[in-house]
Image (cartoon, rainbow, N blue to C red):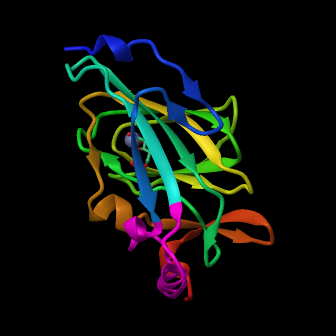
Amino acid sequence: MQHFEQLFTSFDPAKAEIAGAATTQRFLSDLRGCFADGNAYDAALSSGNPPIYHVASIEPGCDSGDLHLGIGLVLPGRIGSEYYMTKGHFHSWREAAEVYIGLRGDGVMLLENESNGQCQLLPLQPNRIVYVPGHTAHRTINIGAAPLTYLGIYPAKAGHDYGASAARSFRHVVIERDGRPLMLERSTLLL
Ligand code: PAN
Ligand code: ZN
């Protein structure tokens, strides 16, 4: 059953706001276990609990052919040398793919395939499209100095799985090194 008022709407690409949409705000405390440097995380949290990102979602229907969409904004910043990022997830319905479109700022998407562990780091920037295949954990990372905003479109029945496999154990981390992003295997980090 579709909600007519959600079939036509407008959005603010700079603020990542959609008229009338429900918005989820994530703070640093919501990302416990995501950042590789636990000491840097605890230190940052002890001096405050800053917002890290938010997502405004439109969910017009939930039949098997329906689509949902979300506009996200990840603030600029780092915990230790690791950039601010989303929790990241698999879709609960693993086959569900997703299309991301960059709107503002300078970001990357970290993709990790569930079955073979293969990982990719793809640019997420204005006028760029990232196709996230099914069975792929995905995380959005702001590598710039300004807010990163993007639009994501996915099957209504995708669902979000934030379990240990996605949120806590992405095998790779993206850190800032000499002013540039660098992807490293988590297991090689000496902290
Ligand atoms: C996006 C994400 C959004 C926030 O709309 O939900 O970027 O990231 P987390 O869900 O990992 O907190 C999406 O991929 N939806 O499926
Ligand atoms: Zn998704």
Q: Is residue 48 magenta?
A: yes
Rendered location of residue 150, percent (x, y): 57, 37
Task: Name the residue: 66% across, 49% down.
Answer: 147
Q: Quadrant of ligand 2?
A: top left
Q: Nearer the viewer, residue 74 or 183?
A: 74
Which quarter of the figure is the C terminus placed in? bottom right
- Drawn side of residue 45 relative to residue 74, left or right: left
Task: Name the residue: 72% across, 55% down.
Answer: 144
- Drawn side of residue 26 relative to residue 102, left or right: left
**Which residue appears farthest toward the front when viewing the image?**
20
Q: Which residues are magenta?
A: 28-51
Whether 161 is drawn above or below 14: the answer is: below
Rendered location of residue 76, percent (x, y): 65, 59
Q: Nearer the viewer, residue 94 or 26?
A: 26
- Drawn side of residue 160 relative to residue 102, left or right: left
Rendered location of residue 4, percent (x, y): 31, 10
Q: Is residue 153 magenta?
A: no
